[in-house]
Amino acid sequence: MNAFISPRNIYHGEGSLQVLETILKKIDAQSIFLLTDPILKELNVIKPILDIIHRLELTVEISTDVVPEPPLSVGNQLVGKVRKANPDLVIGVGGGSAIDLAKAAAVLAENEGEVEDYLNLTGKKELQSKGLPKVLIPTTAGTGAEVTDIAVFSLEDTKDVITHEYLIADYAIVDPVLTYTLPPKVTAASGVDAFTHAIEAYTSVNATALTDTLAKEAMDRIAGNIRTAVWNGRDKKAREEMALGSLIAGMSFYNAGVAGVHGLAYPLGGLFKIPHGESNAVLLPYVYDHIWPSCIEKMVNIAEIIGLPLGGKSDREIAVGVVLSLRDLVKDVGLPATIKEYDITQDDIEVLTENGMKQTRLLSRSPKKLTKEDIREIYQNAYDGTLKSIE
């Protein structure tokens, strides 16, 4: 038996933000805690949301205490603020960090303890209360955080998560209009992040027929539109396809899980503060360069989805072609193709390897079991820019 879980209420498409007014009336919220990225407040991206809140004459406390790759201290600070504000509803608006923080703060506000008490690897407490209702509104087409029950936090040298069904959104609103002003680099990093969600869900050992259907649809939409969205951000059709692709990828990976790319990306974010989307992007081709023999049938399917020529080629040649296309994708959208470009040195490979090994929750979903030697080789190849499949 396979299970599939998602938020009960997902709204998407241009103009879907207007459903927020109906949601607020339904919940009968009188006071709102709105958490958003600082730049979104500065650029008035949240103005349409505030217009709805003010039109209904509701009170709102706005917090911009969001930082990329948030540490535990920021999470605990926000939990304290929400507890003090005692709102009827939490709205999270922004990228993955803002949405993850909103999820955690909404739930932990009505539970005892701090963020570290509920971490996957080291936490000792179990959540008792569902917490406050939450509306999650992404402004990037990438993380899928609005449809998952995961909140990611940076530790000193890696990352850990809170994951529990209570973190699932009560309402998720994916309006591509909010992504129209994203700069190219953010569009690129979040877009490759979304593609990584889809491909890792598709090749996960926990994949099902349902998650595969979603993952293939997501890869098709993202691969066909990401370059246009990055370099011609005013193309509304590309933006809409990226927003929907990210949403679909999120639903797929939430159920099938991500694996080696994310697992090895966590230490890059924890140790070197590389943004999450870029951490995934820089490792994506090197992980699949290592694991493709374990999922070769799906690699052939991926080739067809992303439009690679198949005629007259062996399955091996097709799979290697997918690996090369992943490297090209990262380069085409202007992201670094090696970890060396992030000032990581040869001496850092061993500590990355040690911390990558700790991500057992993610690594367990890889179609190829990754040993310490495998992980070291992947980091080394990502440092050198070497794809062993084409040597």
Image: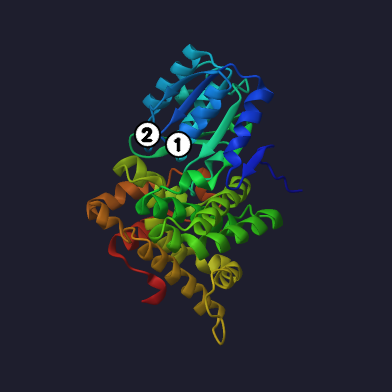
Would residue 16 be found to the left or right of residue 43 on screen?
A: right
> What amino acid does circle 1 point to?
Asp
x then y, percent, for residue 352: 33, 48
Q: Name the residue that disc number 2 marks.
A: 155
Q: Quadrant of the C terminus?
A: bottom left
11 and 377: which is toward the camera: 11
Taking the spot 66% from the left edge, 24% from the top edge, the residue there is 25
x then y, percent, for residue 59: 52, 16
Q: Could you say which disc has been placed on residue 221 in the image? A: none
167 and 32: which is toward the camera: 32
Residue most extreme to the bottom: 312
Would residue 77 be found to the left or right of residue 271 on screen?
A: right
x then y, percent, for residue 32: 53, 20
Vertical placement of residue 49 versus 213, above or below: above
Residue 125, visible in the rendered structure: no
Q: Could you say which disc has been placed on residue 160 in the image? A: 1
Rendered image quadrant of residue 269: top left
In the rendered structure, are the residues bearing label 1 and label 2 in contact, judged by CB atoms less than 8 Å apart? yes
Q: Which label's residue is closer to the chain start, 1 or 2?
A: 2
Taking the spot 37% from the left edge, 34% from the top edge, the residue there is 155
Protein image colouring: rainbow
Rendered image quadrant of residue 192: bottom left
60 and 217: which is toward the camera: 60
x then y, percent, for residue 26: 69, 25
> What amino acid does circle 2 point to?
Leu
Q: What whole-number distance in Å separates the C-alpha atoms at marks 1 and 2?
A: 7 Å
Taking the spot 43% from the left edge, 59% from the top edge, the residue there is 284
CA neighbours of label 1 inside 10 A, class few (<14), some (14 to 19), many (20+):
many
Residue 224, visible in the rendered structure: yes
